Amino acid sequence: PQWVLQRVPVVLPQQTQVKPAPQFLSEARLDVSSSCDPECHKKAPRPSYQDLREFLAYETLHSNGQLTETAVGIYSFRTPSNTHSAYSSESPGKQAQPHVRRKRQIFGHDSRFSIAGQDFLLKYPFSVSVKLSTGCSGTLVGDRHVLTAAHCVHDGKNYVKGAKKLRVGFLKPKQRDTPLSPFYSPSNFINRVGGGPTPYVPPTNSKMKFQWIRAKRTHIPKGWIKGNANEIGMDYDYALLELKKPHKRQHMKLGISPPAQRLPGRRVHFSGFDNDRPGQLVYRFCRAGEETSDLLYQHCDAQPGASGSGVYARMWDRRRQRWERKVIGVFSGHQWVERQGASQEFNVAVRVTPLKYAQICYWIKGNFVDCREG
């Protein structure tokens, strides 16, 4: 499977106006819910050009508490037809079955891996995962930029309490590592990722600490705020943080989300800081399930705290002649749909569409010339 470069539209900022300072009322929610399942999203009409301009307009929260709103113009974009087509009509068998709602977001056997030891934590791709002071996770996508979920800083109505002095934490060992257990040797880890039967074993040395950097600006699309975390708002559950200083780590490139059937083994991957394993970075991968043009449904095991993690895929870059990992979505969290007393459960990621790529890339680069191919 290869990354296919394509020309993307241009999303340019226009008028910017100052808004009243936010109130920072509520605590951050670490997952969101919706009454709209995949079929509901597929039947929704395509947004018009004017709708897209409203959804992609954005608010910027500055570190001094000032709030601005920016209108955008969209260029080189053809408004699609009014039918909402999904890339795949397949429904995984497990997803079609109703599940009793559970507090934990684990589907069957817990297939997550706690990453331990400096050999893994401080090396790519695990080193791109960061923790937000509001309790969520994020992914480094630039020299000083972090991609995360909008609900980590905004509840759909107001900015959350920790958003004004938002900080981003970089996980570092507190002391020299003790020798790793056999489970955490590189060869054993690779075998386990490949599907071996080794069970989860807690790390022998979990004493970790974070180095924190303040966020200078936070960009949130109006589609999230306008939608208030409802059916439309879910499609825009992403935010970009600009740090006050460079983080000096390798970051992951942004990519347009390909159809699930084009992903190697239909697999997606992400790492985050799940609440039930404090101080640990947790990695997981799973098979992508149903998808709409904006959302990807899957049964990756996760817990609150992992939301905001960058969902990525690894494919061949023909131009650079190497394997490349790219962020193709943002993990939003656990979703359930009540039906006749039972609930269908999914974990949901927001896909990076061409328009979202153009917007996020402009936030990172500050120009559209470097954002024409994704």
Image: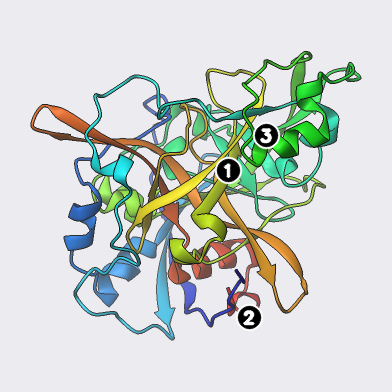
Q: Secondary structure at mark 2?
A: helix
Asked if labels 2 and 1 touch by Cβ distance under 8 angstroms, the answer is no
Label 2 neighbour load within 10 Å: few <14, some 14-19, many 20+: few
Q: Is residue 153 visible?
A: no
User: Label 1: which residue?
Assistant: 270
Residue at 49%, 56% in the rendered image: 266
Q: Quadrant of residue 120?
A: top right
Instruction: Identify the disc placed on residue 369.
Output: 2
Instruction: Looking at the image, tell me whether mark 3 or mark 2 is earlier in sequence order.
Output: 3
Label 3 neighbour load within 10 Å: few <14, some 14-19, many 20+: some
Instruction: Identify the disc placed on residue 170.
Output: none
Locate residue 295 relative to residue 239 in the image: left or right. left
Instruction: Identify the disc placed on residue 192.
Output: 3
Q: Which mark lies nearer to you, 3 or 2? A: 3
Q: Name the residue type under label 2.
A: Val
Distance from disc 3 to disc 1, alpha carbons, whole Å, reads: 16 Å
Q: Name the residue type under label 3.
A: Arg
Q: Secondary structure at mark 3?
A: helix
Locate residue 38 relative to residue 358 in the image: left or right. left
Q: Which mark lies nearer to you, 1 or 2? A: 1
Label 1 neighbour load within 10 Å: few <14, some 14-19, many 20+: many
Of residues 33 and 53, which is closer to you in this image?
A: 33
Of residues 283 and 330, which is closer to you in this image?
A: 283
Distance from disc 1 to disc 2, alpha carbons, whole Å, reads: 29 Å
